[in-house]
Image (tube, grey):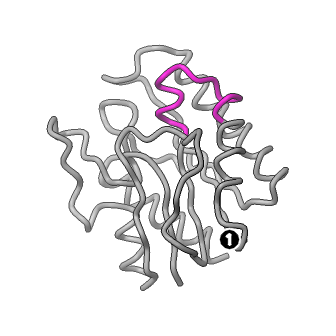
Amino acid sequence: MKVICIGDSNTWGYDPRSYVGDRYEADCRWVDLLADKTGWKIINEGVNGMCIPKKPVAFLGSADQWIIMLGTNDILQGVSAEEAANNMREFVKCIPSEAQNILLVAPPTLKYGAWVRDEKLIFESKELAKHYCRLAEELGLKFVNADSWKLPMAFDGVHLTESGHKLFAHNIEEFVLK
């Protein structure tokens, strides 16, 4: 099975302990863990700082499964959860029409930390799941709220810890397989 994962630094595997943009080792990144455990060919399209694209995007061909987890950086830049969901609606429409198997993931809610000091950011990131759930129903997408997995977050309040990546990989695998 070929899977394309589109996301931000949490998909890419950013290690917040690094000030120069290093990644966690492959044995700790959820995308790589998922590939190792399942044997699936997974293309990691995670990009540090990525927001929901507002223009059409060229994709890497077709896939059996698309996993999209974006919106955190939008919220960090002051975009409301509702506006992020509207942007996601337009982005999903850019995915090739033959892609029938799209999983929209609401990212973990931001936590108070070194990068998150405003309660409004935390509120909007929590609201994102509600808006994504409605969007998934509207567009016929699969949906999961990663916040329900109680993932450990790093000191910055934005990024998953190594154990958070491992738990994410376990839960996303179970969700995709059911």
Q: Main secondary structure of the magenta part?
A: helix
Using a 10 Å C-alpha cutoff, classify the residue at mark 1 as few (fewer than 14 neighbours), some (14 to 19) or many (20 or more). few
Locate residue 128 relative to residue 3 in the image: left or right. right
Q: Position of residue 38 (x, y in %)?
A: 45, 82
Front residue (pair 65, 18): 65
Q: Quadrant of the C terminus?
A: bottom right
- Up the image or down, 19 lies above or below 80; here it is below
Q: Position of residue 101 (x, y in %)?
A: 68, 70
- Up the image or down, 30 lies above or below 41; here it is above
- Up the image or down, 57 lies above or below 172; here it is above
Locate residue 126 relative to residue 26 in the image: left or right. right
Residue at screen point 38% across, 38% down: 49
Q: Disc 1 marks which residue?
A: 99
Helix, strand or loop status at disc 1: loop
The residue positioned farthest toward the right in the image shown = 138
Total marks drawn? 1
Q: Is residue 95 magenta?
A: no
Q: Position of residue 18 (x, y in %)?
A: 16, 40
Front residue (pair 52, 80): 52
**Magenta region, residue range:** 71-84
Locate residue 23 relative to residue 117 in the image: left or right. left
Residue type, label 1: Ala
Residue at screen point 52% across, 15% down: 119
Q: Position of residue 71 (x, y in %)?
A: 55, 38
Residue at screen point 69% across, 56% down: 143
On the image, which quarter does residue 41 sit in? bottom left
On the image, which quarter does residue 134 sit in? top right
Q: Is residue 79 magenta?
A: yes
Residue at screen point 32% across, 53% down: 13
